[in-house]
Image: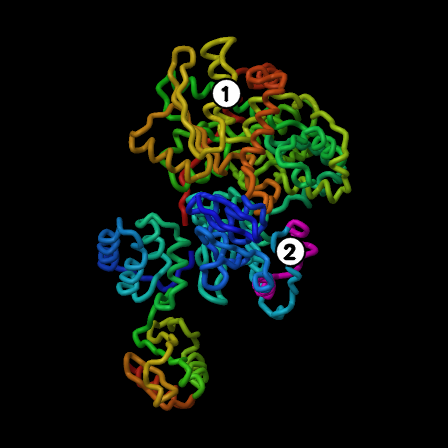
Amino acid sequence: MVNLKINGISVSVPEGSTILQAAKIANVRIPTLCYLKDVQCVGSCRMCLVEATGARGLVTACTYPVSEGMEVRTNTPKVRKSRKTTIELILSTHKKKCLSCVRSMNCELQKLALEYNAEEDRFGTDHDLKPIDDFSASVVRDNSKCVMCTRCVAACAQQTIGAIGPKNRGYAKVIGSPYDVSLAFTPCVNCGQCIVACPVGALYEKSAVADVWGAIVDPDKQVVFYTAPSVRATLGEAFGLPVGTNVEGKMVSAIKQLGDVKCFNMDVTADLTIMEEANELLSRLENGGKLPMFTSCCPGWIKFAEHYEPELLPNLSTCKSPQEMFSAVLKTYYCEKNGINPKNLYVVSVIPCTAKKYEVTREELGKYTDAALTTRELAKMFKEAGIDFVNLAESEYDMPFGEASGAGAIFGATGGVMEAALRTAAYKLGGSGAPLEFKEVRGTEGVKEAEYSLGGKTVKVAVASGLGSARNVIQAIKSGEKDYTFVEIMACPGGCINGGGQPYVHDEVRNNIDLKAVRAQALYDYDKDSRLRASHDNPAVEILYKEYFGSPNSHKAHELLHTSYGKREKY
Amino acid sequence: MAKKLFEGTAEQMSRLMDCINANRNEQGALMPVLHEAQNIYGYLPAEVQTVIAEELDVPLSDVYGVATFYSQFSLMPKGKHRISVCLGTACYVKGSDKILEAIEKELRISCGECTPDKKFSIESCRCVGACGLAPVMIVDGEVYGKLKAEDVAGILDRYIKD
């Protein structure tokens, strides 16, 4: 252990710790900008500068190692002046349209500027605006607001995509994709991890809010919303509620206050996905189909496979994602049953994900979804509608797609799809009394493995979240080192609860809690308290098969609930 | 992807692949490969950068980032005659920016570009050690000093006929 003092507070930390880590233990706050736990630590922004004995000049707390007897001062006039100047230099080239910015009141730069009394125009404001790249279906980049922290670049590199990077040098330096080509024409998988890593308003989703408002007031349209499993666990953050608060009831109430709309539960088609996927897995096992089978619910993973692992495409489940299944069911079964012209039904999917915005544009999925809103966009609509979210009474989802199983709800966390599928596969192979909990596949580690015996069959499974982890698992399969039966992949580290469409969480919070684990816990608690725990017990799914699809993997199911994908060039 | 004036031969590609294969498993292989690629092609065409990215298994954004960071790398083809104008301190105070402007006007291209007939390309440099002759320009290694803007057309004429 190393003993040091920070602002006079004695603290003892493991050798090799940084000043920033030691400060956290001493409860001393040091501001950061380019540092983001688990994503980037390069010491380039100069916000975390401190005075330390034995060091020449000010040092970056995020990278500087502690030493025995060191005395650190984090708030001397010299330090404060340096930080203020740093912020003012950043602001000198920043497009300061703060009032209309997506990050207004939630911007890390704005917060720092206020704390350090920075003047926005100390160094003049004469600079050219850079073009906005909004060709991508998911991600918009406004480089005039970029502060060059490169957190987005690090997040993209961590996903092993590297669609963006620094270009040029000096004043000409910008962050973006090679040449002046839009992100839309790169191997970007639309995961949006760049957006949630961005401290300012330089990156945001392509908004569908105006379209949805338009549909709500259109007298010819009937508008239905459905919400993805993880949204209930994160939406509250946008209204100041603690991370990990389940706000399902308030969310449903608030959606219904937006206008004459219905609100359904996407967990229903998560259950439907499991019925199809578990059957597909069993059929591959029985008929010598391609194994391992990979899950196909995550549109980021799908595009990754198309670009980087096209030879694995036959291993992907042919199931559409719960979003695309739900929209297909709504535009066919639901319309037929209720005598609605599908053209007049406006389907809004609420998702934690920016890749789902790209998914709705895919021709091969039938384009049944009219708009996909991220958790952030839904929160924005509630605020625009003047809804007092925190004090709302709770409501229930509309029928017939209201109640679902806890298995559907845990789809939002890494390992959740696997566990849901195992519950149903175990039941199909072993009958009632089959296990309901498969805790080995839970948790926020990048890769999890387990082996189960289901009805006498040995099933080896792997779960990967984050595309770097996915690559490792695929490498192990290709080299013959591992032979799995079934593999779940989610593109975002931690799964959908950490998706690119989730509420912005400041670095200060992200750096100090296990965001993924706390959000996921809300879903596992929800599952535990659910009346139904397994997808095959979902009565809505039962009705769908009875009245419409016949049985899993039927001809009609294949027509509406399954698809196929093809190889895609990178550049 | 931007298609420039790229025309590569099989022989060039084979030289590039030799260099890539020699460096493939080295850490920091990108720099030597980019240097050799620029030697082979005279610049770094988009197509060549894509080949390098694929072969070295690094994102194109890394290749492009390095290629645009260092001023020795060029993304534009070079002409048969390479013109370089010194923008070092001595030449600059003696008005070499006006010389560069005159060349750009004469050839109807900007600094860093190549004429469509591939005859001339213009670049700028920092101090060639001929400050006594400031302002200077260099064409194919030949130094022209004590220049005035009106000298430019006459000098270029000698190469146009060539």
Which residue, given by chain and number where applicable, does mark 2 sit on? A110
Q: Position of residue A295 (x, y in %)?
A: 46, 29
Left or right, residue A80 beside residue B55:
right
Which amino acid type is marked by label 2?
Gln
Q: Which of the 4 image quadrants contains residue A168?
A: bottom left
Residue A12 vertical position relative to residue A416 in the rendered view, above or below: below
Mark 2 near mark 1, Cβ–Cβ under 8 Å? no
Residue A555 bears which disc, if any? 1
Viewer-side residue, A439 vs A493: A439
State whether residue B32 appears in this view.
yes
Q: Which chain letter goes with mark 2?
A: A
Region in magenta = A82-106
Quarter where residue A91 is shown: bottom right
> Where residue A435 sits in the image (x, y, percent)?
49, 14
| Residue B142 vs residue A46, the one in the foreground | A46
The image position of residue A400, as x and y in percent, is 67, 21
Q: Quadrant of residue B30?
A: bottom left
**Type of residue at label 1?**
His
Chosen colour scheme = rainbow
Under tag 1, what secondary structure? helix
Closest to the observer, B103 or A16:
A16
Within the magenta stretch, is there residue A94? Answer: yes
Magenta highlight on residue A95: yes
Q: CA distance from mark 2 to mark 1?
A: 56 Å
Question: Mark 1 Cα within 10 Å, few/some/many (few <14, many 20+)?
Answer: few
The nearer-to-camera label among 2 and 1 is 2
In the depicted structure, whether residue B31 falls above or below residue A122? above
